[in-house]
Image (cartoon, helix red, strand yellow):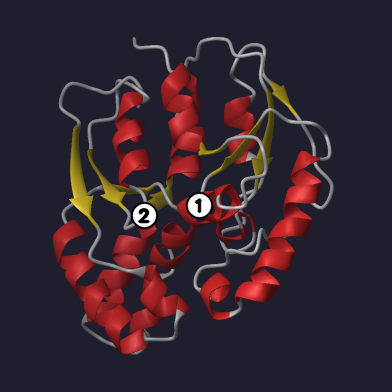
Amino acid sequence: VAASLHVIVRCLEMCTGARWFVLFFVLMIRRPPRSTLFPYTTLFRSLAAHAGELDRARELGRGMIEVFEAAESIVVPSAGCSAHLVRLEELFEGDPVWGPRARALAERTQDLVVWLEEHAESLQFRPDPSRVVFQRPCHLRHAQGVNGAAEAILCKIPGIELLETPRADLCCGSAGSWSMEWPEMAVQRRREKLDDLLAPGPELILTANPGCELFLDSADCGIPVRHLAEYLAGLAVQR
């Protein structure tokens, strides 16, 4: 964060993302002395909304609003969860009490990829000559309209070879709870996605959504599948 920025930032530890949450801090972006980063395990479970359990999602959403309302910035290291949180007000449409509070929270929420792009000038990485492909999570590309931000960050790494893949916007098959509800179709979609990702001959597959990473990695495709934050953390230069 640029030295002139003095805010309270809270970063959500997602239900599948404890490892990436911790590594987010290892990125060692230049922080002002008075900035504070508060770890919290989120009270909001996007899978409840994925599954259509809206009453449960609202219950969890109200709890999350109460915990995070004081934060000036909320950074979410999971595209699936950030996609829900940036539209949290939709859960409380017509609610005169929680609707405005949800809207205010959503306006201060960003996916980690978006937040990193905004502060890209503070990022510095060690060289890595790896051949890398980035799998675009649907909840980042389609649900939030974020396109090219992760790739721009990766291009700051000296020596990296960022490869293009066919049908880059094709879903990997995870799709929230869809892979649990329709496993055979999900596996078929994953097979198609991996064919596209492996086509240019990468040494590493990166993504920005824990659900995508876990689902792709479970196929044992022969090369590592890692979360973007984990990869960046390993190359970040401390300032």
- The reply to whether residue 169 is in sight is no
Q: Secondary structure at mark 1?
A: helix
Viewed as shown, does residue 162 lie left or right of 211?
A: right
For residue 14, what is the image quadrant?
Answer: bottom left
Q: Could you say where residue 100 lies in the image, as x and y percent from the top left?
A: 28, 74
Residue 97: which quarter of the image?
Answer: bottom left
Q: Quadrant of the C terminus?
A: top left
Q: If you read the primary sequence from the N terminus, does the residue marked by circle 1 or circle 2 appear first?
A: 2
Which residue is label 1 attached to? 214
Closer to the camera in the image, 145 or 63: 63
Please report the residue visible at 79 percent of the width from the left and 36 percent of the height from the top.
Answer: 164
Q: Is residue 233 left or right of residue 74?
A: right
Quadrant containing the N terminus is top left
How far across and how far down the image is residue 121, in percent?
A: 48, 21
- Between the C-alphas of marks 1 and 2, the distance is 9 Å
Residue lying at 20% horizontally and 57% vertically, measured from the top left: 68
Tell me where residue 78 appears, x and y as whole percent: 43, 52
Percent of width and height locating residue 173: 64, 64
Q: Residue at x 64, y 49 (%)?
A: 136
Residue type, numbered disc 2? Thr
Residue at the spot of label 2: 16
Number of residues whose C-alpha sits closer than 10 Å to that of mark 1, classed few (under 14), some (14–19) or many (20 or more): some
Looking at numbered disc 1 in the image, what kind of residue is underneath it?
Leu
Residue at x-position 66% and y-position 47%: 147
Badge 2 marks a residue whose secondary structure is loop
Q: Is residue 13 above or below residue 148?
A: below
Name the one closer to the observer, 155 or 193. 193
The answer to whether residue 107 is seen in the rendering is: yes
> Is 233 on the left or on the right of 136, as rendered?
left
Whether label 1 touches label 2, CB < 8 Å: yes
